Image: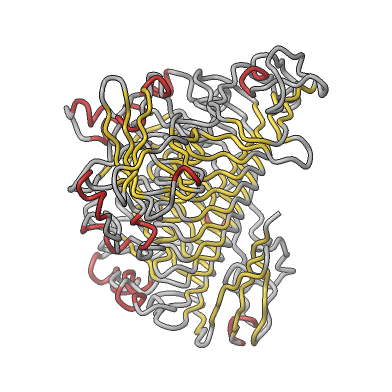
Amino acid sequence: MIFHVSINGSDRGDGSRNAPFRTINHAARMVKPGDTIQVHEGVYREWVDPVCSGLNDQMRITFEAAPGEHPVIKGSEIIKKWERVNDRVHKAVIPNLLFGDFNPYDRKIEGDWKVLPKEYDVHLGDVYLNGESMYEAVSLEALHEAPARLEGHCPDHAAELVPHPLPDPEATRRQWRAVVDEENTTIYCNFQGADPNNETVEINVRPCCFYPKRTGIDYVTVRGFEMAHAACPWAPPTADQMGLLGPHWSKGWLTEKNHLHDAKCCGISLGKDAATGDNNYTHYRRKPAYFYQMEAVFKGIRLGWDKEHVGSHVVKDNLIHDCGQAGIVGHMGCAFSRIEHNEIYRIAAKQEFWGHEIAGIKFHAAIDTVIASNNIHDCREAIWLDWQAQGTRITGNVTYNNARDLQVEVSNGPCLVDHNVFLSPLSYDDFAQGMAMVHNLFAGSMNIRVEGLGRNIPYHLPHSTQVAGYAEILGGDTRLINNVMMGKYDACENVCAPFSMLYDRFTTPEEFIARNDASPSASGIVECRTIPQPVWIEGNAYAGNAVPFRAEKNTIEAEGFDAVLEERGDSLELVLQVPRAVAEAELEEVTTERLGYVRFPEEGFEHPNGEAIDFSMDLLGVSTEGKVIPGPFTQLKAGKQRITVWKRK
């Protein structure tokens, strides 16, 4: 059955096309498995709280835009009555009844692994002038002058990861500050000369736009909406991870073709529920925060974290931007999911606050999760996999203009990174073990952290959430095969020249035998002294500042290799300059069998169903046709060529 919702409707109607409901929430209480809610043109200012589950993929509950129409769900309200304080500042006095039991102007951004500016607190509220987010002022006194900010608030140790100066310093002068008492919230704004009574001014009111308050609301489809202005809180892996949109510890959601923006913290949350802990380190500080994170895993298992009950979501073809913490976030609830063909950009671009959870995609415990064919750019980090990346695959993505394209941290693997294009100055940060980096294009440097990791991380039975044991993260157990290392940036020379400069500290097989009276392991894997686990580096092409590993086999000198990304309408095109040595290379084919098993989970680089991966298909879906060359493309010719690597749908 199809129910209709229109801003001109009434919740006393029957939901038919001729008598549509007025609110999406009312329709959500009428549906049964297999039903569809079509939402017509207009702005809906409500927190959609679905209460009915679908039964399976064939009997879903579907929320979708009516064909050819553009419905918008906002967590904000328009404020019209502004009073002039002086030539620079206006104020609005808002009864606290508008906010109910959630007043974002009285709630700080706080929680585990979070860092705020030292000068002042940042709150969950926000003010939007004609759709543009304003900045929270340091104080009421500072609001009157509202000087432009030239850089964001970032601790010294993270300064190198801020991708750019603030995009528009002059826009940072549009500032607000709130004062909350028992009855009212007074918001003071410096609109830089704009008259708020003649413009559209909106303020954050609700924490979410589309998010069930209960867990276990399964098999829901959300398609074709614009959603914006959610005052969602900071979402580390130890918190109740709310987002502008999300399934809230459920199974089988399909989220596609939505436009999501201006979440205070996270656009989409596939994360954990408060029942497994909610910022317990911040509240209690009885033990290090990562112990609370480990406890959350075991609490999650007791509460039904398994493939039958949680995860298995599909997030595809969405546009996500201008969120303060993450485009997509998740701990445990992201397991068994597929994140495909989304465009994510300007995450943490305002740099109002900082923490260890900021990225285009930030996942913990992404078991058997696939991140494929996404376009992620102009973020602090593009993809950050943290803790228990096991059976995880990152394939066919294009990332650029980020502070860092990829980080994999404290995971035992297997984690497969194949056929990606990483174009930022820092392409990869390795803080893990059990990795395979196969047929990628790395333009920038790599940072390999091998000393002092020292944390013991759970590993799981293959393709399961059940914990099999613990292992200390030592580094190594890594395969780096058939990639192109462009060495395009000066930093490549100073930051390990993609893998090889750091690995050049390791012994050759001959040195290993002489110094340790032992033999290197088989299958081309080279033992080393610095890390007690092997590394396998073979068949990579090196150009620019990148230097081959001295013990590497089948090295290709690719001097002159270059790649420049260009936007052409809805397409991203890579202009390549390919040396003959790359185009005519003949390398050994990579297979699941050849990559072997990672050491601790004893699991191979395979599909979630256990089947072998076909590495002969490149980023474009083109077969090698029996000839294997380095990098993410199977069909290259010597000289200049143009390849479309991503296209909006």
User: Which quadrant, please, contains the N terminus?
Assistant: top right
Q: On screen, 484 above or below 391?
A: below
The outermost residue toward the top is 12
Please tell me how many numbered marks the rendered image carries: 0
Provide residue 417's location: percent of width, then percent of height. Answer: 51, 56
Q: On screen, 100 above or below 356?
A: above
Looking at the image, residue 506 sits to the left or right of residue 100; the answer is left
Q: Is any atom of residue 304 visible in this view?
A: yes
Provide residue 210's location: percent of width, then percent of height. Answer: 55, 30
Q: On screen, 593 above or below 461?
A: below
Report which quarter residue 521 is drawn in: bottom left
Report which quarter residue 275 is drawn in: top left
Residue in the image at 20% along x and 35% along y: 288
Provide residue 400's location: percent of width, then percent of height. Answer: 49, 65
Residue in the image at 33% along x and 24% along y: 277
Q: Nearer the viewer, residue 487 or 196?
A: 196
Q: Nearer the viewer, residue 31 or 416?
A: 31
Residue in the image at 39% along x and 70% along y: 445
Q: Is any atom of residue 434 visible in this view?
A: no
